[in-house]
Amino acid sequence: MSDRQTQTDVILIGAGVMSATLGTILKELAPDWKITVFEKLASAGEESSNEWNNAGTGHAALCELNYTAEKSDGSIDISKAVNINEQFQVSRQFWSYLVNHNRISHPQEFIMPLPHMSMVQGEKDVAFLKKRYEALTGNPLFQGMEYSDDPAKLAEWIPLIMNGRTSSEPIAATKIDSGTDVNFGALTRMLFEHLKKQNVSINYKHSVDNMKRTGDGSWELKVRNLDSGSVERHSAKFVFIGGGGGSLHLLQKSGIPEGKGIGGFPVSGLFMACTNPSVVEQHHAKVYGKAKVGAPPMSVPHLDTRFIDNKKSLLFGPFAGFSPKFLKTGSMFDLIGSVKPGNVLTMLAAGAKNIPLTKYLIEQVMLSKEKRMEELREFIPNARSEDWDLVVAGQRVQVIKDTEAGGKGTLQFGTEVVSAADGSIAALLGASPGASTAVSVMLEVLKKCFPQQMGAWEEKIKEMIPSYGVSLAKNPKLNEEIQSATAQALRLEKVLQPA
Ligand SMILES: Cc1cc2nc3c(=O)[nH]c(=O)nc-3n(C[C@H](O)[C@H](O)[C@H](O)COP(=O)(O)OP(=O)(O)OC[C@H]3O[C@@H](n4cnc5c(N)ncnc54)[C@H](O)[C@@H]3O)c2cc1C
């Protein structure tokens, strides 16, 4: 029975960091627009954006080795790292604007300064790290990065990792103090609190089950009220599908041709969390290693200090695994249900191509705690099993599509904005680099869906994001000003001063 119908300008599906970011930007650009949010869970930021479901790294390519590939001539390609760093600077500027204009407060509740480090062992990887360091330090975005292969220096930087290390293999690390730990769950909740105050209608326990285009080009959504069981109809001129892992199903339901031929491959995540406060206290950094051969890029092991619920924690992982669910709270039928006539050939090709990856992920799921401890001991030689518990993290649904470079059924590791030609609907697929780049990705949604308004909005966007449209890597002076202003607004400034 349908008992409620509304009409609005914008509907955001999902209350994760992406919808939160898009809603917040839109409220600045078009304050009069009416926005409605539907979220099937009981509150905001409960799926991938929740602090326990992701690694909380402010991805700026300061420590992630997979963003700097070694070319066939042995040189290092830093273009991806520069691009990701630029995107993170966009996020920092937007968050600073929100703090400076009292849209949100207490930035230390969602972002904390934390050194970002890369650490490798073995001659080949040490040589790679040195080359990477040399390639990056010439770029203004990576200023302040240090390199060391001196065990005494490393013991100062990462005592927990160096203590009890008996291996004679060469070891090296880079360290940069301008890294961050971001509590994306807290940020999402803050943004939804702000949206609520701006009269955005936020409907929790409301699941979007279907959608169709109406005669006037708007979208009508069939929404189930999970408390009462009633079915509601809500229409909007623009719909953003920010359902995280749930976005692919919703995109397929929209029936737009741009969504055809796209599939999804879920990769689950597990962390080990340290329960011994004296061990937690001995570490203060995010330390990223190198992915094992055959492992997907999102399972690069890292040992991270985290700041959650005003408490310092220590997490290791993520261990990737396979589960057919598209959301942590999803269904075992998500994967099979996503195979449609429009993507079946792509999915079959992907299945055939990715047998080794699937095998790897299934083996990972089967790992015993002791086996996981062995991996942890590559970071902390003295780690004791009794000090560590397993924590189940979120699901990441990687996009599968046909590409020129990879052919049919190629697995993608980035994010993808899929929108209708008339800009009336857009979906965000994929989860990497993820929440850190939410602001840039949501600006891309606006560019694709509101091309006529972008001209009028540009001045306001530049007020919020002074580097909008400008490369910070190519403008060292502006970069310095922005780094310093955002560090001050977000209370990160202490770490930017030399010790
Ligand atoms: C293990 C792991 C580690 C990660 N580490 C990092 C990291 O270190 N740094 C980083 O920047 N990013 C990281 N990410 C990625 C990041 O978490 C995601 O990119 C980001 O949280 C996605 O936000 P979202 O809003 O798109 O999705 P979500 O936060 O998942 O929100 C989507 C919401 O939509 C709701 N929904 C879905 N379907 C429906 C429906 N039909 N009706 C109503 N509501 C619906 C869901 O319930 C959910 O609340 C990580 C992810 C994982 C899984």
Image (tube, rainbow, N blue to C red):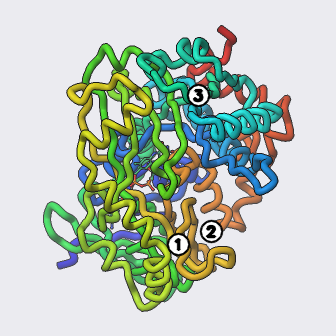
Residue 359 screen position, x and y as percent: 37, 66
Amino acid residing under circle 2: Cys
Residue 129 screen position, x and y as percent: 67, 36
2 or 1: tag closer to the N-terminus:
1
Look at 65% across and 67% down and name the residue there. Answer: 448
Q: How many marks?
A: 3
Look at 60% across and 48% down and name the residue there. Answer: 66
Task: Determine whether the residue tagged by mark 1 lies in a helix, strand or loop.
Answer: strand
What whole-number distance in Å separates the C-alpha atoms at marks 2 and 1? Answer: 7 Å
Tell me the crowding category of disc 2: few under 14, some 14 to 19, or many 20 or more residues within 10 angstroms, Cα based: many
Image disc number at residue 171: 3
Q: Which residue is mark 2?
A: 449
Quarter-of-image position of residue 369? top left
Tell me the crowding category of disc 1: few under 14, some 14 to 19, or many 20 or more residues within 10 angstroms, Cα based: many
Q: Is residue 212 visible?
A: yes
Task: Determine whether the residue tagged by mark 3 lies in a helix, strand or loop.
Answer: strand
Asked whether disc 2 touches disc 1, contact meaning CB atoms under 8 Å apart, the reply is yes
Amino acid residing under circle 3: Ile
